[in-house]
Image (cartoon, helix red, strand yellow):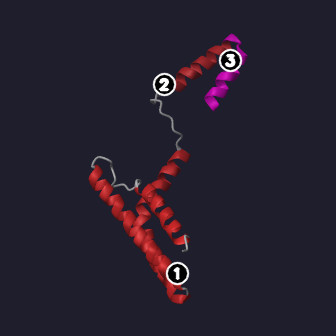
Amino acid sequence: MDLKYPVILGITAALAWWLSRYDSRVTAENPIPDLKRRTLRCGITLLLVTVGLAAGSGGGIVGGFGCIATVVPIGILWTGCLSEVMALGFHQLVDASDSREFDPKELTRELDRLAELVQQGRSGEVIRLCSRLRG
């Protein structure tokens, strides 16, 4: 028995289940509809992958067309989830995860402290404070 098809379907199922949690309509407020939605999306994906594998194993131009004909619906099915994952990844690159509350006067206080340290001639502390403010 050839094990590559069950392995491919198993990996597809695991990846699909993980990716389905990024569906914008899965809110975790209603677990039963969320579970149904994720299960349906993963089931359709497994069905399409199975059809694509069966078509591709036949070879020839018909097999190639069958693979392409299943890839397009899979792409359409997962576009929302993939865009959500990409947006979250981009957001983490652009905006560091800083959970502190925004204090609009913090920079002014730090600059006043810096000026005070410079006037007192405490250059070591000035350098440390500048490094901390910069990083």
Question: Residue 130 location, x and y as percent?
Answer: 66, 25
Task: For the residues labelled 3 and 2, say whether their Cβ atoms are less than 8 Å apart.
Answer: no
Of circles 3 and 2, the one toward us is 3
Q: Helix, strand, or loop for circle 3?
A: helix
Q: Give the residue number, with chain letter if any, for mark 3.
A: 125
Q: CA distance from mark 1 to mark 2?
A: 63 Å
The residues tagged by marks 1 and 3 sit, at their Cα atoms, a distance apart of: 68 Å
Q: Are marks 1 and 2 in contact (CB under 8 Å)?
A: no
In the picture, the disc for residue 56 is 1
- Check disc 1 and report its element: helix, strand or loop: helix
x, y percent for residue 102: 46, 30
View extreme (top): residue: 120
Q: Nearer the viewer, mark 1 or mark 2?
A: 1
Residue at 52%, 81% in the rendered image: 56
Q: Position of residue 60 (x, y in %)?
A: 55, 88
Instruction: Tell me the crowding category of disc 3: few under 14, some 14 to 19, or many 20 or more residues within 10 angstroms, Cα based.
Output: few
Q: Which residues are magenta?
A: 120-135
Residue in view at x 40 percent, y 72 percent: 47
Query: Is the residue 105 above or below the residue 23 in the image?
Result: above
Identify the mark nearer the N-term, 1 or 3.
Answer: 1
* Residue placed under numbered mark 2 in the picture: 105
Give the amino acid at mark 3: Glu
Near mark 2 (Cα within 10 A), the count class, few <14, some 14-19 or many ≥20, is few
Q: Is residue 54 visible?
A: yes
What is the spatial separation of the Cα atoms under label 3 and label 2, in whole angstroms? 21 Å
Q: Quadrant location of residue 13?
A: bottom left
**Could you tell me residue 104's position as x and y percent?**
47, 28
**Residue type indicated by callout 1:** Gly
Within 10 Å of disc 1 (Cα), the crowding (few <14, some 14-19, many 20+) is some
- Residue 4 lies left or right of residue 125; in this view the side is left
The first of marks 1 and 2 along the sequence is 1
